[in-house]
Image (tube, grey):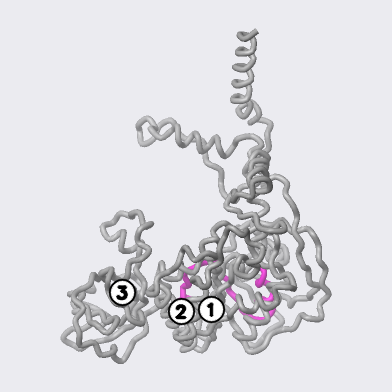
């Protein structure tokens, strides 16, 4: 009897192990539920030799194609989230069926606090962008979108302790010190939160929240905007929420969405070219498919006022798209954390939208923008020693970037470069940003950048119009001290 039981046990074990391979030919393709290309079957040979990493690559290939993976993942998440109330698939299960991104917990509890220097560096960076846009006849508005947990904190689990301040509150306070124009979306949305502005099972605001945000953003940018308050609205439970999909890739629950009966102006896409159905293309950009939405441009055929918008956005900007298109003759939308300011035409308004959990990205890479010329740097009689500087000539100009010692007093985080040769001295203001990727690839090889988040540095692009050529002495002024960066050569 015992032997029979062992045989049955072994047979069941091997049947379970073999089931995924046996079901692969008939099971649905997991590619339909993934927002990426599935891992390809690995090659047996690599660079003329036996592929020593074949086993790991095969494991990745198999994991992507395990039959009924979505159903198994949904079952696992049901047990962990609904029964055990534990975070699963990067989702926090809150009170009354509310879901939150697990990454929001760091902002909520302030465990990802940016340093004071980083906060000031972000404020200075935004102030320099604003100065550039306004000097060229446009308007600038920074739009930090609050995490869902920052607005509807009452639905976060009790085990998460809300901090009194975090990166968003510290940055908005600092922006006031630097006179940077920003939309206080957190205050606005918390004031109207009882109206239901975020999805319960999605990380983003719904169309009602987006409409409220649109009025604030467009009025601050243009001084006026189209009024849609008389539009009829219906509430329908048909929204497939992103957090719910993470928990239940196969099945799940629908969320409510607000739909407004608005007749928008006639518009067309100039990029991508050849769009036949503008409505269908817009709906695609507003969806979570994230296909081809990195950059696109529209022209409103019913507006002839020459108004132009350049919107730097993330996924929160999706719901704003039809409103912004409907208010500008020309509009361009770039999905990025690092704006290309030099590509923005004169007289264009810049709306820089970024969600709270990504604020630290503002100081990870300097915007592509020419350094402003200054008449002179602030007086700095005290020497701070030396600093590292690298100079590279590119087709668009001369890029100068470098690093300060970790204990450098950055003061107000404004960094000035004094470039001098026999013909005289010129002064530029640099972004107070440590260029992690550039600094880590000086020797031609990329390195791990995970430990570089707290380093201090500077970055500037000098326009070709400045006609830099030859050898210069470089001094860097920051925090009331001058640092000797040695000689730089522009070839």
**Between disc 2 and disc 3, whose residue precedes?**
2
**Which dot marks residue 8?**
none
The residue lying toward the viewer, choosing from 137 and 411, is 411
Q: Name the residue carrying label 3.
A: 398
Real-space Cα distance between discs 2 and 1?
8 Å
Quadrant where the image shows the C terminus: bottom left
- The image quarter containing residue 157 is bottom right
Q: Quick check: can you spot residue 334?
A: no
Relative horizontal placement of residue 144, taking residue 424 as reference (left or right): right
Real-space Cα distance between discs 2 and 3?
22 Å
Q: In this view, does 161 lie above or below 136?
A: above
Q: Name the residue carrying label 1.
A: 142
Residue 373 lies in the magenta-colored region: no
**Between disc 1 and disc 3, whose residue precedes?**
1
Q: Where is residue 427 in the image (x, y as percent from the top left)?
A: 28, 86
Range drawn in magenta: 319-343
Helix, strand or loop at mark 1: strand
Helix, strand or loop at mark 2: helix
Q: Name the residue carrying label 2.
A: 126
Q: Where is residue 287 in the image (x, y as percent from the top left)?
A: 67, 60
Disc 3 crowd, CA 10 A, few/some/many (<14, 14-19, 20+)? many
Numbered disc in front, either 1 or 3: 1
Quadrant where the image shows the N terminus: top right
Q: In this view, does 385 lie above or below 178?
A: above
Helix, strand or loop at mark 3: strand
Please name the residue shown 60% across and 75% down the image. 186
Numbered disc in front, either 2 or 3: 2
Residue 327 lies in the magenta-colored region: yes
Q: In this view, does 421 lie above or below 66?
A: below
């Amino acid at each position: 009897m015992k032997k029979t039981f062992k045989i049955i046990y072994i047979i069941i074990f091997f049947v379970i192990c073999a089931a995924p391979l046996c079901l692969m030919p008939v099971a649905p393709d997991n590619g339909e539920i993934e927002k990426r290309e599935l891992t390809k079957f690995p090659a047996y040979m690599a660079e003329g030799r036996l592929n020593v990493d074949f086993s790991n690559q095969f494991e990745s290939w198999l994991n992507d194609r395990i039959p009924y993976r979505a159903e198994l993942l949904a079952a696992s998440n049901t047990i962990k989230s609904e029964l055990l109330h534990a975070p699963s698939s990067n989702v926090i299960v809150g009170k009354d069926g509310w879901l939150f991104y697990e990454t929001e917990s760091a902002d909520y509890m302030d465990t990802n606090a940016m340093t004071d220097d980083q906060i000031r560096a972000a404020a200075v960076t935004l102030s320099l962008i604003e100065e550039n846009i306004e000097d060229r006849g446009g308007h600038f508005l920074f739009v930090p979108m609050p995490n869902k947990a920052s607005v509807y904190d009452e639905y976060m689990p009790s085990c998460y302790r809300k901090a009194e301040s975090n990166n968003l509150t510290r940055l908005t306070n600092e922006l006031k010190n630097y006179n940077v124009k920003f939309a206080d979306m957190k205050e606005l949305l918390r004031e109207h939160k009882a109206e239901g502005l975020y999805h319960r099972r999605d990380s983003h605001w719904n169309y009602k929240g987006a409409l409220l945000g649109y009025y604030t953003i467009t009025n601050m940018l243009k001084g006026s905007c189209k009024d849609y308050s008389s539009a009829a609205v219906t509430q329908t439970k048909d929204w497939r929420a992103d957090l719910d999909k993470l928990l239940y890739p196969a099945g799940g629950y629908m969320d409510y969405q607000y739909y407004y009966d608005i007749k928008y102006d006639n518009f067309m896409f100039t990029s991508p070219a050849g769009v036949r159905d503008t409505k269908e293309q817009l709906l695609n950009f507003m969806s979570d498919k994230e296909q081809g939405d990195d950059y696109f441009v529209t022209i409103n055929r019913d507006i002839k006022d020459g108004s132009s918008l350049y919107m730097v956005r993330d996924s929160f900007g999706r719901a704003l798209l039809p409103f912004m298109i409907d208010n500008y003759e020309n509009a361009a939308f770039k999905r990025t954390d690092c704006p290309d300011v030099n590509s923005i035409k004169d007289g264009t308004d810049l709306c820089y939208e970024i969600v709270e959990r990504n604020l630290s990205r503002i100081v990870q890479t300097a915007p592509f923008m020419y350094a402003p010329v200054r008449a002179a740097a602030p007086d700095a009689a005290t020497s701070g020693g030396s600093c590292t500087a690298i100079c590279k000539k590119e087709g668009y100009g001369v890029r100068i970037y470098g690093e300060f010692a970790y204990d450098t007093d950055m003061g107000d985080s404004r960094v000035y470069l004094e470039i001098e040769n026999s013909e005289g001295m010129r002064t530029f203001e640099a972004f107070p940003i440590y260029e992690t990727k550039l600094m880590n690839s000086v020797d031609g090889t990329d390195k791990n950048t995970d430990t570089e988040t707290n380093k201090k540095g500077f970055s500037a692009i000098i326009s070709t119009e400045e006609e830099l050529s030859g050898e210069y002495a470089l001094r860097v002024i920051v925090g009331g001290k001058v640092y000797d960066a040695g000689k730089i050569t522009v070839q």
